[in-house]
Image (tube, coloured by chain):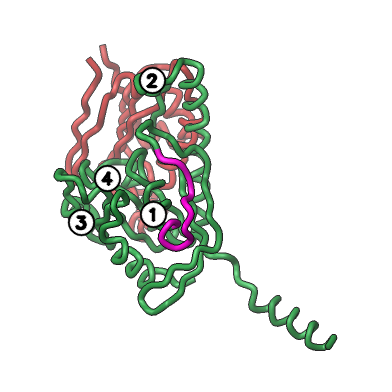
Amino acid sequence: MAWRHIFNFFLGFFSAKKSFSIGIYGPVNAGKSSIANRICMDWTGQPLGSVSEIPHETREVQKKERVAIKAGGKILTMNILDMPGIATKVDYREFIEHGLNKADAQQRAKEATKGIVEAIKWLEHVDAALVVMDSTKDPFTQVNITILANLEARKIPVIIVANKMDLKKSRSDKIKEAFPQHAVVPVSALNGENMPKLYEEIAKKVSP
Amino acid sequence: MIAIEFLSNNALGKNQDKLQYILTAVKKGDKIVVLEQPLTSSEEAQLIQLTMQQVDKNFAGIEIATLGSAALDIKSHLVKLLGGRTSGLTVVGPSKIVKQIKKDPNKLNLLTQK
């Protein structure tokens, strides 16, 4: 009946909610894309993007829409945004050391710088953030501090993901010491260890 | 030889485009710049963006570290509004000279390239 279509249209119009986006931030080679892939594989069966040992593999924002995560008695539907790694320097010579020729290395550097600018722009548009840190490295870096401070200033909920807990040198306690104001969840994107804990924390912190 | 430039609050205050001023000193002058007034987290993010727009084969980027209150909390806002200074400093250097700035909450160690 026509009146039912009109009713549904208005119901949909007034209940329409901006889609909820969770950004995956962090420095270069912390394992952001591996985390994004693990989340997408767990809940959609498909990965989000490629990963590589060569820095700046993700040079554009990668997006998976409407990923439904079941955790903490809730179903959270959100867009997953895998951000390019943030850095203060991009030297094409580093890519040559990884086996790229000069032209490809310079092209990759150019794309990487654009990706960093884009990732910073997106800080204003995400509804929540997973900040991925390599738990085998010193967490007290200016890049980590700047990312967290900008998210805090915008009152965006943050969970720190202490990745690479499968490695012997992993020290997630150092990350907790450095950023005691944030929830820190140690995980291994490689083997999926502790990912359920991360989903619980997302359900606790995030309310789309 | 390594050149270090200490920039007072007044020097930066007079400049309309503070971040470009800092970046020009670092990029063209190959200087390590020490700012009397620390950059806010928002300014740091903007400086990274500005740096990335200017990276080329001769300029790979910067090393940056802020000691002290980078975040503009209510207290810092009030101090600024009243014309006062917030505590701390920011160090910015070209990555071809500054290899790394090691940081803990109370000190900075700046390591230069050989």
Q: Chain of mark 4?
A: A
| Earlier residue among tags 1 and 2 | 1
Circle nearer the viewer, 1 or 3: 1
Q: Amino acid at mark 2?
A: Gly
Q: Amino acid at mark 4?
A: Asp
Q: Which residue is mark 1?
A: A38
Q: Amino acid at mark 1?
A: Arg
Estimate the spatial distance between the alpha carbons at disc 1 and disc 2, rounded to whole Å: 27 Å
Residue A60 included in the magenta stretch of the image: no
| Earlier residue among tags 4 and 2 | 2
Instruction: Say whether residue A184 is visible.
Output: no
Q: Are marks 4 and 1 in contact (CB under 8 Å)?
A: no
Q: Which residues are magenta?
A: A40-51
B69 relative to A172 in the view: left or right? right
Query: How crowded is the residue under tag 3: few (<14 C-alpha within 10 Å), some, or many (20+)?
Result: some
Q: Which residue is mark 2?
A: A99
Circle nearer the viewer, 4 or 3: 4
